[in-house]
Amino acid sequence: LNVNPTEILTPTDLGFPLIIEVHAPVTVSVRGHIEVSCQTEVPSVHLQTEVMGEANMHGFVGTFCPFTKKMMATGVKQQRIVNLPIKTSLKFDSTASKFKITMVPFKTTTSSNKPIDVLYSSVKPYTVAKSIYSFSPLTRSESFKLIKSPSPVRKVEVPFGGILGLNFKTVVETESRYLDTTYIMNYLRMYNFNPMNMIRFAFTPSVSEQGTPSLRRHEFRVQYDPKNSQTHEIETTISVGVATKHSEEQPRYHSVGIKSLEELRNERCILKKLNPYSI
């Protein structure tokens, strides 16, 4: 789904056409299976899915060269990927009025024992000179080249999640000159500490030396290493209860019970007949 298809063609003083295009394709993939157990006392749902979402934004400005029969353009490519391979189990114990939720990350053929990129975001400026007779995308052209700034690529890795026994790691690779507390404060100050402005201009995560937005090469990822994580399963239990209180009366607590076959037959409402539980 292309949420922002924009194509502009305008003439120039030299007679060459000026082409401006912006595209923002979004792809969501869900693979897996679901198992449902309809037991009255302990119904359960087992869900094993691999959810992956990708949102890109490609924008470029270019022109056609009549001498070389090529399209020469410069632009920026932004990519965001979310990957969640999780196995979830949901059970409801009607006798104890409790929900039990279990989440286990499962191994996929692509991840194996390697770290999984749960989140990935990148900004890459580029130039390209592609033949007008080629139908391949600009970013797949052989002449595709990244624009590099004079600043060297800096890499910072910050592990976290050790308290919970989870091996997470944040990896940042950027050409920004500053990558410390000053960089964070300059980034927040640049957008007046407004989170809405940061979301609207998320394609400019880098900050120049003058404190202005920059399109320098920038990569950010959050990795999860299931092999070196001590915690392999997360379990949560939620108790469910209902209480009523009338004026000048003490609160009355109610428990969840299972209707008998006779009670289900005597129900007049169809929706109540489909619900085997009562309070």
Image (tube, rainbow, N blue to C red):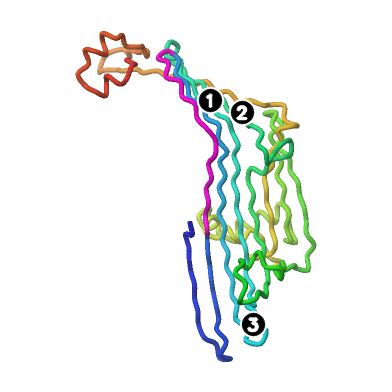
C-alpha separation, residue under disc 3 versus residue under disc 1: 58 Å
Disc 1 secondary structure class: strand
The tag earlier along the polypeptide, 3 or 1, is 3
Residue named by callout 1 = 89
Q: Amino acid at mark 2?
A: Val
Q: Nearer the viewer, residue 241 or 191?
A: 241
Disc 2 secondary structure class: strand
Q: Nearer the viewer, residue 197 or 54?
A: 54
**Badge 3 local density, few (<14 within 10 Å), some, or many (20+)?**
few
Residue named by callout 3 = 69
Q: Residue at x 63, y 68 (%)?
A: 138
Judge left or right: residue 246 versus residue 159.
left
Instruction: Report the quarter where the C terminus lies.
Output: top left
Judge left or right: residue 8 versus residue 73.
left
C-alpha separation, residue under disc 1 versus residue under disc 2: 9 Å
Position above or below: 216 against 9: above
Magenta segment range? 25-41
Q: Amino acid at mark 1?
A: Ser
Residue 114 position, x and y percent, is 74, 39
Residue 75 bears which disc, if any? none
Does the magenta stretch mainly form a helix, a strand or a loop?
strand
Q: Amino acid at mark 3?
A: Lys
Q: Residue at x 63, y 53 (%)?
A: 121
The tag earlier along the polypeptide, 3 or 2, is 3
C-alpha separation, residue under disc 3 versus residue under disc 2: 54 Å
Residue named by callout 2 = 104
Q: Quadrant of residue 161?
A: top right
Residue 182 position, x and y percent, is 70, 55
Q: Tell me, yes or no, whether the highlighted magenta stretch contains residue 206.
A: no
CB contact under 8 Å: marks 1 and 2: yes
**Badge 2 local density, few (<14 within 10 Å), some, or many (20+)?**
some
In front of the other: label 3 or label 1? 3
